[in-house]
Amino acid sequence: MDKTGARLAIDDRQQARNFTMFLKDHDLEATYILGDGDTKYRGPFRDVLKADDIEIVRIAFSAPKMNGHAESFVGTLKRECLDHFTITGTDDMGHLCQTFATY
C-alpha cells in the first residue's frame, strides 16, 4: 500500500471511530447503516463498525427510491427548514436538524 492509500485507511478508521463516539456520546444506537457502493464503506471503515456490531447494508446501485422514507425526510428537512436559514457551521446545522426532528 502506498503512502496515500495508508493515509486514506487511517482517515477512514478515524471517521468510523468519530461516528461511533458520536453515537455513544448522544446515547444513540445503530445496528445498520445504509450505504451505496462508495469505497468509504469498505475496508478499515467497515472493520471499525463491525467491532461495534454495526452492519453496513449496501443499497442497490442507482436506486434512489429504495430508501424512499429517508429521501422524503431529507427533502422535507431541506425545503421546510434548512432553505430558510443561513447555516454557518455544524453546530447550527445540528441544532436546526434536532429542533426540526423534535417538531
Image: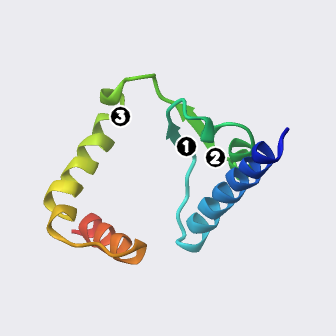
Report helix, strand or loop for mark 2.
loop
Amino acid on which disc 1 is placed: Tyr
Q: Position of residue 70 (x, y in %)?
A: 32, 43
* Helix, strand or loop under label 3: helix
**Which residue: 17% across, 62% down?**
83
Q: Is residue 47 above or below residue 89?
A: above
Q: Picture coordinates of residue 27 (x, y %)?
A: 54, 69
91 sits to left or right of 36 = left
Which residue is denoted by mark 3 in the rendering? 67
The numbered mark, 3 or 1, whose residue comes first in the sequence reads 1
Question: Of marks 2 and 1, which one's residue comes earlier in the chain?
Answer: 1
> Residue 22 or 41: which is nearer the viewer?
41
Number of other residues with Cα within 10 Å of mark 1, as a class: few under 14, some 14 to 19, many 20 or more = few
Disc 2 versus disc 1: distance between alpha carbons?
5 Å
Q: Which residue is mark 1?
A: 32
Mark 3 or mark 2, which is nearer the start of the sequence? Answer: 2
Residue at the spot of label 2:
54
Q: Amino acid at mark 3?
A: Asn
Is the residue marked by circle 3 packed among few (<14), some (14-19), or many (20+) residues within 10 Å?
few
- The residue that appears at 55% across and 43% down in the rendered structure is 32
Does the residue at mark 2 contact the one at mark 1 (Cβ under 8 Å)? Answer: yes
Q: Is residue 73 visible?
A: yes
In the displayed structure, 99 sits above or below 60; it is below
Q: Compute the Cα span from label 2 to label 3.
A: 19 Å
Q: Residue furthest right?
A: 1
Residue 51 seen in render: no
Query: In screen coordinates, is 61 left or right of 30?
Result: left
Residue type marked 2 = Ile
Q: Residue at x 61, y 35 (%)?
A: 39
